[in-house]
Image (cartoon, rainbow, N blue to C red):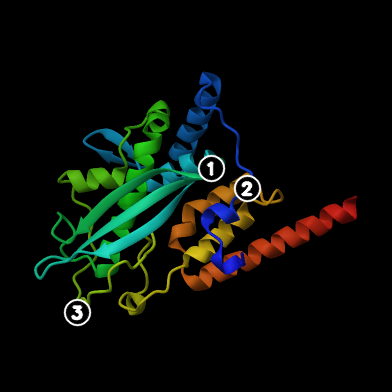
Amino acid sequence: MNEATKTTKDITKKVKVENFDISRSDETLDLAKDLAKFIKDNKLTTNVQGKEFVNVEGWQYAGSRLGIVPIVEHVINVSTEGELKYQAKVTLFDLRHQTTVGAGFAVCSNKESGKKFYQEFAIMSMAQTRAIGKAYRNCLAWIIRAAGYEPTPAEEMDYNTNTVVAAPAPTAAVVQPVPAMQVVPAEAPAIAAEQANAPVQYATAAQKEEIIRLLNHPVITRPEKTKMLLNINRLDEERAIQSIAKLRKAIDDRENGEKAAA
């Protein structure tokens, strides 16, 4: 089997992840405390009617500590003549047990409160972001609750309440529909106006799998792995290529340093 035809399961067979035993109360408590501190320190919550709901980045961090990463299955254009709407599906892959452990579906529409003037890429991105949060919620709500937060992703509350979220300024650009089954990244910060309507080539599944494989090399530190996993769905192809090159160089440099020290 060549590299191009390897699946996520093939590539991650020798992955090393943290060995938390969630059946032990002491280990669950330690993980919950660490998660609570990370979420608080990085301000990864949204206040809705006086309650704190964790943003998708916090859910991704919880998943990464358990070796569970999101895989985007699809983002489908289900728009109608009067509505811009996308549906996304995300599955969760357990690196330790080499199996799929959960899934989540979500939609986003410009008919929602606060999204009337959202551009198409933002509607697609939010559908995927919500699907990631939903997938993790189905699998890890217990650990978020143990950390002291509401067991529902903040992005899902945005969908289910009338809370108004600041929308981008109106634009005169004509929205062009895209083919179904197009995979897009999680919601990213605002980009330059001249790039807003340009098509973006996001990181391919093969690139993401290669990044995950490299991140689980023994010389890569846990903070480095966590930071990259939290942002992997936001990479375009060029940034993915750069990240792969940097990871390979870091691994080579550190392995050579260990050999020299020996």
Near mark 1 (Cα within 10 A), the count class, few <14, some 14-19 or many ≥20, is many
Q: In which quarter of the image is the N terminus?
A: bottom right
Residue that numbered label 3 is attached to: 174
Residue 11 picture quarter = bottom right
> What amino acid type is highlighted by mark number 3?
Val
- Graded by Cα atoms within 10 Å as few (under 14), some (14 to 19) or many (20 or more), the crowding at tag 2 reads some
* Image x and y of residue 112, in percent: 15, 55
Q: Is mark 1 on a helix, strand or loop?
A: loop
Viewer-closest of 96 and 6: 6
Disc number lying in front (3 or 2): 2
Amino acid beneath label 1: Gly
Secondary structure, mark 3, is loop
Residues under numbered marks 3 and 2 in contact, where contact means CB atoms less than 8 Å apart: no
Position of residue 253 measured from the top left corner of the image (x, y, whole percent): 77, 61
Q: Residue at x 36, y 65 (%)?
A: 183
Farthest left residue? 82
Q: Are marks 1 and 2 in contact (CB under 8 Å)?
A: yes
Mark 1 or mark 2, which has the lower sequence index?
A: 2
Q: Upstream in the sequence, badge 3 or badge 2?
A: 2
Using the image, determine if residue 181 lies above or below residue 106: below
Who comes first in sequence, dot 3 or dot 1?
A: 1
Question: Which mark's residue is nearer the viewer, 3 or 1?
Answer: 1
> Relative to 109, does residue 216 appear above or below in the rendering?
above
**Left or right: 72 with respect to 251?**
left
Looking at the rendering, which quadrant does residue 246 occupy? bottom right
- Whether 157 is drawn above or below 240: the answer is above
Per the model, the C-alpha gap separating discs 3 and 2 is 45 Å
Against 81, residue 110 (above or below) is above
The residue wearing badge 1 is 67
